[in-house]
Image: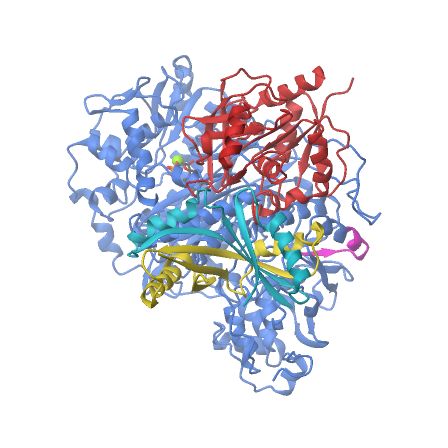
Chain colours: A red, B blue, C cyan, D yellow
Amino acid sequence: MSAARVGVVTFPGTLDDQDAARAVRLAGAQAVPLWHADHDLKGVDAVFLPGGFSYGDYLRCGAISRFAPLMDELVPAAKAGLPVIGTCNGFQILCEAHLLPGALTRNASLHYVCRDQLVRVEQTATAWTNSFASGQEILLPVKHGEGRYVASDETLAALEAGGHVVFRYVGGNPNGSLNDIAGIRNEAGNVVGLMPHPEHAVEELVGAPSTDGLGFFTSILKNLVNT
Amino acid sequence: MSEGAGRHMADSVKRAAETPDEPMPFAELGMKSDEYDRVKAILGRRPTGSELAIYSVMWSEHCSYKSSKVHLRQFATKAPASEALLVGMGENAGVVDIGDGWAATFKIESHNHPSYVEPHQGAATGVGGIVRDIMSMGARPIAVMDALRFGAADAVDTRRVLPGVVEGISSYGNCLGLPNIGGEVVFDPCYLGNPLVNALCVGLLRKDQIKLATAPGPGNKVVLFGASTGPDGIGGASVLASATFEDESQAKRPAVQVGDPFMEKLLIECCLELYAADVVVGIQDLGAAGVSCATTELAAKGTGGMTVDLNLVPLRDPSLRPEEILMSESQERMMAVVRPDDIPAFMAICRRWDVPAAVIGEVTDTGRLVMTWDGEVIVDIPPGTAADDGPVYERPFHEPAGQAALNADTPDRLERPGDLRETLLKLLGSPNLASKEWVTNQYDRYVRSNTVLAQPADAGMLRISEVIEPERRSSAGESEPATPTDAEAGATIEHAEPTTRGIALATDGNGRYAKLDPYAGAQLALAEAYRNVAVTGANPLAVTNCLNFGSPEDPEVMWQFAEATRGLADACRTLGVPVTGGNVSFYNQTGSTAIHPTPVVGVLGVIDDVAARVPTGFVAEGLRVVLLGDTRDEFGGSEWAHVAHRHLGGLPPQADLEAEKALATVLVEAARRGLLAGSHDLSDGGLAVALAESCLARGVGATVELTGDAFTDLFSESASRALVAVRPEAYAEFASLCGRHDVPCYGLGTTGGNALVVKDVFEVPVEELRETHTAALPALFG
Amino acid sequence: MARVIVDVMLKPEILDPQGQAIARALPRLGFSGVSAVRQGKRFEVEIEGPADEAALAEVRKMAETLLANTVIEDYDVRVEA
Amino acid sequence: MARVIVDVMLKPEILDPQGQAIARALPRLGFSGVSAVRQGKRFEVEIEGPADEAALAEVRKMAETLLANTVIEDYDVRVEA
Ligand SMILES: Nc1ncnc2c1ncn2[C@@H]1O[C@H](COP(=O)(O)OP(=O)(O)O)[C@@H](O)[C@H]1O
Ligand SMILES: [Mg+2]
């Protein structure tokens, strides 16, 4: 049986695609490059939308990328249950594409922030977090200028009531996100978006001083084996 | 008078021959009359407006190094033999062999004046420019650094300039996906009207993939690609465009260039794919002097001739005149020389990355650079005369009138403090020594996943692990079958496994030391960067430098420059590290007052196994704290004299390069053998500040004991020293290693606890150190 | 050739830290009498044909789907006076 | 209470990378007939008193010194219609 195949999407201006692919490989899966201009998901088992400045973050982060041909394929596939994760710019794209509710706006500090951030895993019942313990605190880097999660009062209440807040910042909120929200999931739990970067916390020697990001990749592998 | 096609005729070669006496505005373009006479002699007639545009920018100080050349030559003539040096000075950037078939290319460059006028855009385009230099060597840019100097931290204008500069570097570098792995932030009133923004970029390539700026092979095509050309940074050329014709369209010509980091990111990926497809014969980035510089330099280094049709240059503003196109400094552009058969593949790759590209000319063997506009020849020159044969000045220099008095005013007369605890906290909370997190937290240090060491660390360190082939391949969407990038559906991302190898980089410079003694000051800058690389366990290999000075027309400034270059060249020889490239920035002065002479030196080192890297500071309890090197009573130009007394006088610390070399040998060898648990170099603020920063690294305290005069031991800035943390069981082996290399080695105490304790002198809780250290910049900048 | 203006502002209930930062800075810079500032975006869209109803409808669609994120922003489309 | 609008746009000769990126993307998104897009900022300044000449002069000064970067931007101040 061949290894699980995780697609890693590259838009013009994507930055963390190599890093995400490396993390996928470290976890024992196969990284499959997906190109924004193709109408082709290449039959992957799951999709990682990495961070970066797609289209320079011009207009709004993710606003132009969500119109990419690849997204025409990804949106219905995600709605049909394909596991999809978006980190940072990937999260922004998922919100712009309305696969996740709410929006990510300019940090309250008005500065880009790069720092090692404690994050609490609130929900383990998603395709990407089932290797974690509920309430587990993990260390991941954040690095973004527009990561302040906002949504209408009703949306926020629904997120909280439904248990759709997957990650919360602890020990300081880096961007002013409502309810300290660092990441959320969709109703079905197959689509997850978060601002922190698991792919930069997978090796001892490089990146953040933590390997907590590996849990995301072992989660998806477990999930794929189980289904 | 815009009848007909709505376009004025340009000043043609034919017209120049017919109107030999027409006055040309060479003085407005910064050209001296003897320089203008030389142009006439070269051409045997008056230059056309376009030719004058080319000569005036190519012979400017910025492009021709006319005042500095005679001094910079020492970097080559005194260069130590180095097997690592693959490409030396004179190319876009130097290239060094870092082992396993890999090469690194790195360079530092200034964008000082633009960053004062418009801090955000000035700094951003500074990063963009140096990154393109690195790309043009055939490399993938893999990291940036920034060495910054501002006026006093509490000055009103610093509050305008610093946040803008940091935001510019942050927005541009982050958007390119280049980790920022280090730099400096220094405050001194002398930089108030002349902030320094020096940006460094390092790139990685295979040894056999080096690209050069050359245009060989008659018949090969000249391609301009990237952003379209607009009226950016052509203040001077407007004079020209309107000089011979009364023209209404030239009113608005901005001096400020605006960067488009997204376009530059596309250019990076596009270039790498072009290199991998082997469709580039020669390449040059467009920086200062834009098309003028790229065409003359490529032609001069190639077969010697080139034709260019300026009507083919894609324009953002259709009203641009040819003179302006030649001088435009629009960002994010590159020029390549391409075999005719490869043009379709070249263009297909550009299209895939949404990068506009246009063939604008052809390589010839005529020895002439010929440009046309509306069918008329407007430039016809031997390109080497513009690119290489610019004027060279032996500017007069002499020691500044006040130099002897400055050196005689030693810090001996300053009152020394009684309360050393207070002195430490005062220094640690002073803007120059305070934590730079307010700045560095705005920079992405993790992207590309190869960052081993970054802020706060003595040097930035990267693991060498790079994709060789472009990995992103499309299986659809390309029409040309010739596209070399078509790949099988479902291809996995190609990659090279991470090697164990790494590179380390540090930049340093101390304008106060250089003011007191430019010769020693430049050597101390090199010594500090060299030491910062060595304390991480990397072996220093090569040097880049950015020489920031006042006006070369001032003989006293010129003396500082001559002394600094002499000092740096001598020190490079002694330390065995060649200068591979750099940049000179003159005219950093307000009125007749120049900045402190500020040579900023970058050193690149190599480490065979990044797992052996030595982290900065005290990483655990129970380690022996050891001071390496001798401490003398040296306070000239020190941070203490600056903070406590606003005093600058005397002589800087002694630059003992042999001691520096021995220290580095010990540090690198000890790291290789795994003897060091942590390290930190000693520099501004001396031992006291190094101890405090070492405690702050991981929140581990230490208890140490001093033997000499406590103030001198704690705050002197003697060079060639480092602090290391050694596991007790490794101490004997380490001490004998030091003995073998004659490196003085003093056990000071042990790590542990929640405070920095200097026995019989003071005790400061680590938390108090942290509070003092981190509060300063946020208090100033919000 | 006509120019259509699209103004995009955050919905009133969404926090606008940029506007707030400006409002906070004003007194320090010697400006008084300002009770609030909000910062939004202004787009100048040059269209090739005339700004007739069809063209405006097109720009409105552009604003709705691209220029504004209607989850958090309101927009206004008008022909330049 | 009155609302004064300050529009800030990059000077026409200055590169507007955002506007260009949007304009380049439009055809791919199915929008045609747009020849150029420029993106700027719009500020809504709420003032406490009436929008008389004195108040407008004050806002103009604010635009000149704070809201616009006059090295690269132009601004326009008007009372909301
Ligand atoms: N402008 C800057 N850009 C990036 N990193 C910086 C900058 N200024 C300081 N740093 C980093 O912050 C850390 C502390 O800086 P500093 O105290 O100046 O170090 P040192 O005294 O060793 O030269 C180092 O890792 C340095 O590289
Ligand atoms: Mg240091």
Q: Position of residue A164 (x, y in %)?
A: 55, 25
Q: Position of residue B765 (x, y in %)?
A: 27, 24
Q: Is residue B143 above or below residue B501?
A: below
Q: Quadrant of residue A51?
A: top right
Residue closer to the observer: A210 or B4: B4
Q: Position of residue B631 (x, y in %)?
A: 28, 32
Classify the position of ligand 1 by quadrant: top left, top right, bottom left or bottom right.
top left
Q: Position of residue B451 (x, y in %)?
A: 53, 32
Q: Quadrant of residue B221?
A: bottom right
Left or right? Give the position of A185 relative to B70: right
> Looking at the image, can residue B493 be seen?
no
- Magenta span contains residue B336: yes
Q: Is residue B189 above or below residue A181?
A: below
- Image quadrant in which the N terminus of chain B is located: bottom right
Residue in the image at 30% along x and 44% along y: B652
> Looking at the image, can residue B124 be seen?
yes
Most extreme residue toward the right is: B481
Residue in the image at 26% along x and 36% along y: B716
Most extreme residue toward the top is: B729
Residue range of the region highlighted in magenta in the rendering: B333-345
- Image quadrant in which the C terminus of chain B is located: top left
Left or right? Give the position of B754 relative to B474: left
Residue closer to the observer: B312 or B36: B312
Residue closer to the observer: B633 or B614: B614
Q: How many marks?
A: 0
Q: Quadrant of residue A87?
A: top right
- Magenta span contains residue D8: no
Q: Is residue B202 above or below residue B703?
A: below
